[in-house]
Structure formats: C-alpha cells, structure tokens
Image: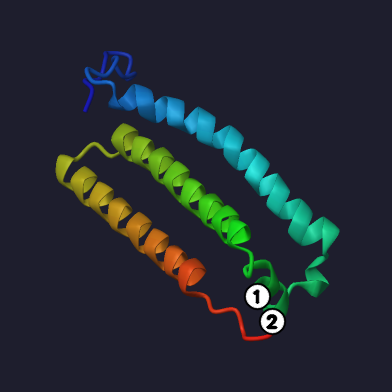
Amino acid sequence: MAELTAAGGRTRPAGKLELYAWLFMRVSGVVLLFLALGHLAIMHLLEGVDKINFAFVAGRWSNPLWRFYDWFLLALALVHGFNGVRVMVDDYVRRPGLRVFSLVMLWVLTLVFLVAGTLVIVLFQVPVGG
C-alpha cells in the first residue's frame, strides 16, 4: 500500500500495478460503455422487453458469438467493479485487519459471481429444435 501524505492524498505507488489498474479502469470503462449500450439497444429497443423470454435467450445463445458477447460483458463489468471497490477499500479502510478481510471477501465474491455467470453461459443447453 502507498504511504499517505500529510494532506491525506496518496503518494505515487512504487510498483506499476496501480498504473496498470488505473489504465484498465479507463479502457474497460469505454469498452463497457459500448457493450452496455449495444446490449440495451438489442434487448430493449430492437426486440422490446415483452419479447424476452426463455425461447428468445435460447435462440440468441444458439450462436456462440452471442454467448461470448454476454460473457465478456459480465466478466469485464465484474473485474471493472472489483477494481473500483478495491481502490475504495485501500483508500478508506484504515485498520489493516479489516482491510485484509474486506479485500479477501471482495476477491471471493468476485470469483463466485464470475464462476457462476460463466457456468450459466457455458452450460446453458439450447433445447433440441430451438
């Protein structure tokens, strides 16, 4: 963790991890913007929410590219959110034991949601004839 300055701000990190995390947040934010807008346009504007049901998802996920699109949106959003919360924990949780506990729980929750979402997308069975 970086040392705090007298003004309460953080000094520049010694390693490049924080620089890469900062860059990742900017790039993934832009990519997520386009992925989410595409998702909203397809699911809500072109089709309409009244047409979204199991058959619609099964038909869409019969194409592996749509599965990848949805998985990539899920994974990128989870990792982007994880990184943002990780920075907030580092900035605001002062007690070392609580900080470690918070970060471990954040890692666990992120991995659980990523594994669960990946399993749903990968193991989803398109009905025969669907």
SS category of the residue bearing label 2 = loop
Which colouring convention does the figure follow? Answer: rainbow
Looking at numbered disc 2 in the image, what kind of residue is underneath it?
Answer: Gly
Packing grade of label 1 (10 A; few <14, some 14-19, many >=20) is some
Label 2 vs 1, first from the N-terminus: 1
Packing grade of label 2 (10 A; few <14, some 14-19, many >=20) is few
> Which residue sits at x=63%, y=64%?
63
In this rendering, the count of numbered labels is 2
Q: Tell me the tag on residue 58.
A: 1
> Which residue sits at x=80%, y=73%?
51
Q: Between tags 2 and 1, which lies in front?
A: 2
> Which residue sits at x=41%, y=59%?
114
SS category of the residue bearing label 1 = helix
x and y, in percent, of residue 128 in the image: 63, 86
x and y, in percent, of residue 120 in the image: 48, 71
31 displayed left or right of 51: left
64 displayed left or right of 41: left
Residue extending furthest toward the front: 129
Q: Disc 2 to disc 1, how far (Cα)?
A: 7 Å
Looking at numbered disc 1 in the image, what kind of residue is underneath it?
Answer: Ala
x and y, in percent, of residue 107 in the image: 29, 52
Say which quadrant the C terminus sits in. bottom right
Q: Is residue 49 above or below residue 103?
A: below
x and y, in percent, of residue 60 in the image: 68, 67
Q: Which residue is mark 2?
A: 130
17 displayed left or right of 67: left
